[in-house]
Amino acid sequence: MTTNTIESILQENRLFPPPSQFSQTAYIKSFEEYQQIYEKAKTDPQSFWADLAEKELHWFEKWEKVLDWQPPFAKWFVGGKINISYNCLDRHLTTWRKNKAALIWEGEPGDSRTLTYAQLHREVCQFANALKELGVHKGDRVGIYMPMIPEAAIAMLACARIGAPHTVVFGGFSSEALKDRLNDAEAKVVITADGGFRKDKTIALKEQVDLAIADQGVPSVEKVLVVQRTKEPVTMVEGRDYWWHDLQQKVSAECPAEPMDSEDMLFILYTSGTTGKPKGVVHTTGGYNLYTHITTKWIFDLKDDDVYWCTADVGWITGHSYIVYGPLSNGATTVMYEGVPRPSNPGCFWDVIEKYGVNIFYTAPTAIRAFMKAGEDIPNARNMSSLRLLGTVGEPINPEAWMWYYRVIGGEKCPIVDTWWQTETGGIMITPLPGAIPAKPGSCTRPFPGIIADVVDLDGNPVKPEEGGYLVVKHPWPGMMRTVYKNPERFRNSYWEHIYPKDGQYFYFAGDGARRDEEGYYWVMGRVDDVINTAGHRLGTMEIESALVSHPAVAEAAVVGRPDEVKGEDIYAFVTLENQYSASDQLMKELKDHVVKEIGAIARPGTIHFTDVLPKTRSGKIMRRLLRNLASGQEVAGDTSTLEDKGVLEKLRGG
Ligand code: WTA
């Protein structure tokens, strides 16, 4: 549920205009040009998107109608036939890009691989044929649970090629979380690997798949396709599990891309919401292809000779849109890195930049804050002069981290694009265009052309400049999610029934609080619902609470985010125990491990606070606002008159 008061937290007035040299060669060269395009798109969004769709993408058949909007359900390029794998691969093969590096991959142990467009195309076609061999048809859902290796991208493109919607599950999720997602999607086949390398260890992915599907855990799964990566032993079930390298020998490298309806489902990606069960966010083909294509091109100012690197994992939307689909649709060179910064190699990101001469670098504020902590000597010891543009995503960036990124990584010459968007939006929504919009540290600046954003109150009225309100989008856009998989009602009530404009219009409610300054710049302040952003990962407090109460010792749990210097927010859990249990360090550890087992390591609570009581209203609702205050060590602010037991705060402080 939404809270009514949103306070403004950032005050920052420094302005960083785009360097003139950058602007001269940029796609959008000046603020005036941005404004012109923006106004044109606002006046006639349909022609704006249709012109781009015509110019930027290949269509097997043109659409009959640009937009069919039956709120809250949108259809884009209705009747058009398109295939995103064709747009990412085939169309580049008839140009000089055929032998250009499409994917540069660096493994954590230091191995590497480069695939040209022709090679990537070949592998995707083979993989698509392997899926067909395993009985996958158009419309069947395929689970992908992979480390960050080229085959993860190949698998996604292969699914797209034959029209089988994929659902990628982040490799850090546990078998339990994997099971829930595969069941909801009713996946027919799962693509995985024996394991992957992460933080100098191996993670046993195939084993997690085995656990998830054992004992009819996921009855829909018929086959498992396994890529060899770590070469550690795995159990292969005859007739169910297949090695990719075996199938690869047998399949043809020819597989024409299936002409898909523009509105055919491209993928489902699960994300956290207000209730315990993750939502299956559905994206479709034509609109998503266009939206990720054009945002990648204009926001990253992506040119043919650029080496572009986004550090996300393909298990998240950022990996889908800005490692795989957006860059490849543009015919760019996209870098994929298996590792993450780790004690044995805290400078690994900078090594990758130096090794491949990366020009455009896109990462998360939590990573930047960790680098700040590790010290600037580490990046300073590398030559990163190839960089020309930096980006951030995932959470608000504090001005201090922005300045460090600008100075230490960008050498005070690279514009920074602070990009606001969500799994649901498909692509970037509010962001600087780097050659056109002066940046203010901590602000994601202005909406992308075609995006009609606003900051409003609960009646949908715009709030005054500098006042806090709810971030909304007032007109459909091609990259928007279409529904929650198998649950249109949840789509409607999660996103379209919070804000009620008096004139009956539909506003997309993002779940974020924001303010707009006098110059029209947006400052996103964070979630206003029960979702937390921890170390760049989005988790629902209810998900973690359900995991905790599934442990026999736990009677009740309430989870809140506590501000954290590096992670942004850390998970803080208040727990009451069943009578026969008592608090101990041992139990605390057991509960943390239990959450890891139920969801994954990304959800491990930083703190478990045992208490006898939780603050509740007379109607029995847990007062999270009070718990947030307590967790962050602040005075309990605001009204406590609805609190049922006034003594509870004292007990919690003492606890
Ligand atoms: C937050 C990630 C401030 C926001 C692409 C949003 C941001 C949630 C920014 C979506 C940003 C993302 N500034 N906050 N530049 N980018 N967020 O679905 O709270 O994993 O609602 O998508 O991240 O997270 P998700």
Image: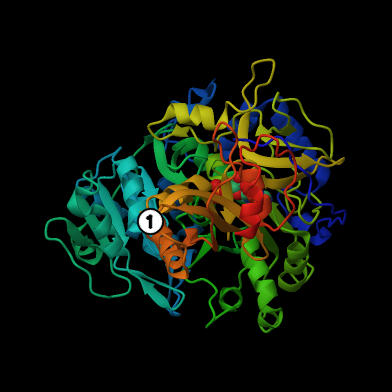
Q: Is residue 628 visible?
A: yes
Asked whether, in this view, residue 618 is left or right of residue 32, the answer is left
Asked if residue 522 lies left or right of residue 288, the reply is right
- The one nearer the camera, 535 or 558, is 558
In which quadrant of the rendered view does residue 226 lie? bottom left
The correct choice, above or below, for 131 with respect to 336 in the image is above
Label 1: element kind: loop
Residue 322, given in percent of the width and then of the height, sits at 54, 54
Nearest the viewer among 550 and 459 is 550
Number of numbered callouts drawn? 1
Q: Is residue 617 above or below residue 557?
A: above
Vertical placement of residue 339 versus 2, above or below: below
Where is mark 1, residue-wise?
A: 580
Q: Is residue 428 visible?
A: no
From what the image shows, is residue 48 above or below residue 318?
above
Q: Residue at x 78, y 67 (%)?
A: 413
What is the residue that sits farthest to the left in this orientation? 238
Nearer the observer, 93 or 472: 472
Residue 352 screen position, x and y as percent: 56, 75
The image position of residue 358, as x and y in percent, is: 61, 69
- Residue 242: x and y in percent read 19, 60
> Looking at the figure, which quarter contains the N terminus?
top right
Q: Tell me the kind of residue under disc 1.
A: Gln
